[in-house]
Image: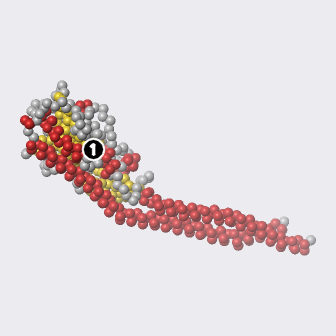
């Protein structure tokens, strides 16, 4: 009985004097390691975010300049296209037009249309809404002389989807050729009631320059788009309106595909808060699906714009409300965070159109290198912890073995003396 009491006492002394102090020291070192690692990582992330805030304004400003220059380029092309039509009408004389052509026809309900006579022909559709106007067929045929201009402009910029001229009496010449114009357009189409016409009239555009529409559904079947439009006057008379279309798909793919050092999403918003176009990555966060294409079930009788959910001022989504606030307050930089997402958000004006370019920088991508480094250093700490656990198990076994041997050396002489 005394033998085991002495052995137990020696074991306890070994543990207290050797094992416990070492374990406490090692635990303190590990705690210090993980704490310092977390502290350094947190400080690094905060510094990185602050540095990004300082740089992102300049980066987003340059991005806005790039987008603005693209719109300015299309505006200049539109102005040249406008001049070409003004020149046409300044010299147009219906008495000099030959109407004996097999490529232009008049339907039973007085719609004038053409067939494709060569590869780069433009389509012509003349609705029956104003059939009493004289020389309709002459004007339709004469406008064919501008087909070379149309094709040159169409090829001048990859973002141009189509271009057209709409007359006051609802004649539409459009390029590229539209083979299903008779099926796509309503035959009594009153073109001046559509936004791509009336926004350029004297009431909406007294300067008679180039203006941009908001996003709308194209009656010609090209889906959702925006347009640069300009009036064509002969003296003080508005002959019609020319337009250059950029589809929402091209706008997102070619213009808003901004390359930044971080994962980012771009959005274009008009002056009234309507989302003209946005990256697909923002769709689930905003609870919206961008309108790029459309299945046409019937001809469009009026202008169709995006639903009210695409207006940031009316959408109740958390990110929408945040974007609405920074637009109202004209904030250039803000921070948004909810349960699933965190963004640094910037906004810049697009001077050419009066719109706003919004960039949302994904904070998780910004901090990804720092988090990856912390994960590696944490892994080193966990490896050290595992190594220490294995080491102390072996060390403990050796200590217990040694304490047993030591106690035996003490007890043996005592037992012999007692015996």
Residue 207 screen position, x and y as percent: 13, 51
Q: Residue at x 29, y 57 (%)?
A: 66
Residue 367 screen position, x and y as percent: 45, 60
Disc 1 element: loop
Number of callouts in the render? 1
Q: Can residue 244 be seen in this view?
A: no
Residue 418 screen position, x and y as percent: 90, 72
Q: Residues within 10 Å of mark 1 (few under 14, many from 20)?
A: many
Q: Note whether 405 is above or below 110 in the view shown.
A: below
Residue matched to label 1: 161
Q: Can residue 178 be seen in this view?
A: yes
Q: Which residue is drawn at 20% across and 52% down?
A: 76
Residue 284 screen position, x and y as percent: 40, 47
Asked if residue 402 lies left or right of residue 92, the reply is: right
Q: Quadrant of residue 55?
A: bottom left
Q: Which residue is drawn at 20% across and 36% down?
A: 124
Q: Quadrant of residue 24?
A: bottom right
Question: In this view, which residue lies farthest toward the front?
Answer: 118
Colour theme: secondary structure
Quadrant housing the N terminus: bottom right
Q: In which quarter of the image is residue 13?
A: bottom right
């Amino acid at each position: 009985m005394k033998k085991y009491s002495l052995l137990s006492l020696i074991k306890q002394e070994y543990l207290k004097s050797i094992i416990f102090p070492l374990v406490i020291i090692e635990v303190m070192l590990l705690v210090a390691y993980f704490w310092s690692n977390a502290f350094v990582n947190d400080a690094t992330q905060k510094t990185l975010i602050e540095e990004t805030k300082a740089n992102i304004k300049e980066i987003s400003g340059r991005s806005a300049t790039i987008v603005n220059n693209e719109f300015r380029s299309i505006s200049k092309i539109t102005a040249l296209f406008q001049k070409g039509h003004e020149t046409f009408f300044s010299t147009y004389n219906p008495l000099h037009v030959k109407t004996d052509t097999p490529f232009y026809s008049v339907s039973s309900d007085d719609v004038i249309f053409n067939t494709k006579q060569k590869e780069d022909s433009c389509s012509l559709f003349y609705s029956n809404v104003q059939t009493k106007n004289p020389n309709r067929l002459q004007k339709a045929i004469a406008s064919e002389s501008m087909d070379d201009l149309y094709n040159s402009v169409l090829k001048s910029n990859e973002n141009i989807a189509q271009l057209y001229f709409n007359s006051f009496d609802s004649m539409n010449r459009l390029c590229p050729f539209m083979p299903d114009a008779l099926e796509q357009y309503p035959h009594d189409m009153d073109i001046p009631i559509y936004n791509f016409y009336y926004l350029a009239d004297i009431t909406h555009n007294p300067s008679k320059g180039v203006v941009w529409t908001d996003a709308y559904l194209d009656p010609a079947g090209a889906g959702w788009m925006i347009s640069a439009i300009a009036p064509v006057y002969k003296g003080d008379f508005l002959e019609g309106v020319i337009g250059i279309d950029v589809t929402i798909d091209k706008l997102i793919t070619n213009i808003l595909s901004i390359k930044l050092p971080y994962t980012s999403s771009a959005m274009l918003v008009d002056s009234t808060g309507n989302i003209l176009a946005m990256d697909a990555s923002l769709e689930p966060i905003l609870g919206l699906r961008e309108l790029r294409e459309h299945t046409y079930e019937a001809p469009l009788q009026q202008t169709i714009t995006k639903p009210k959910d695409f207006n940031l001022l009316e959408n109740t989504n958390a990110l929408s409300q945040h974007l609405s606030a920074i637009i109202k307050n004209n904030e250039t930089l803000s921070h948004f965070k909810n349960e699933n997402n965190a963004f640094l958000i910037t906004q810049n004006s697009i001077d050419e159109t009066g719109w706003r370019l919004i960039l949302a920088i994904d904070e998780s991508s910004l901090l990804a290198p720092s988090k990856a480094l912390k994960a590696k250093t944490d892994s080193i700490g966990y490896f050290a912890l595992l190594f220490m656990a294995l080491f102390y198990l072996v060390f403990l076994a050796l200590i217990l073995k040694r304490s047993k041997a030591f106690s035996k050396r003490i007890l043996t002489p005592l037992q012999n003396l007692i015996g």
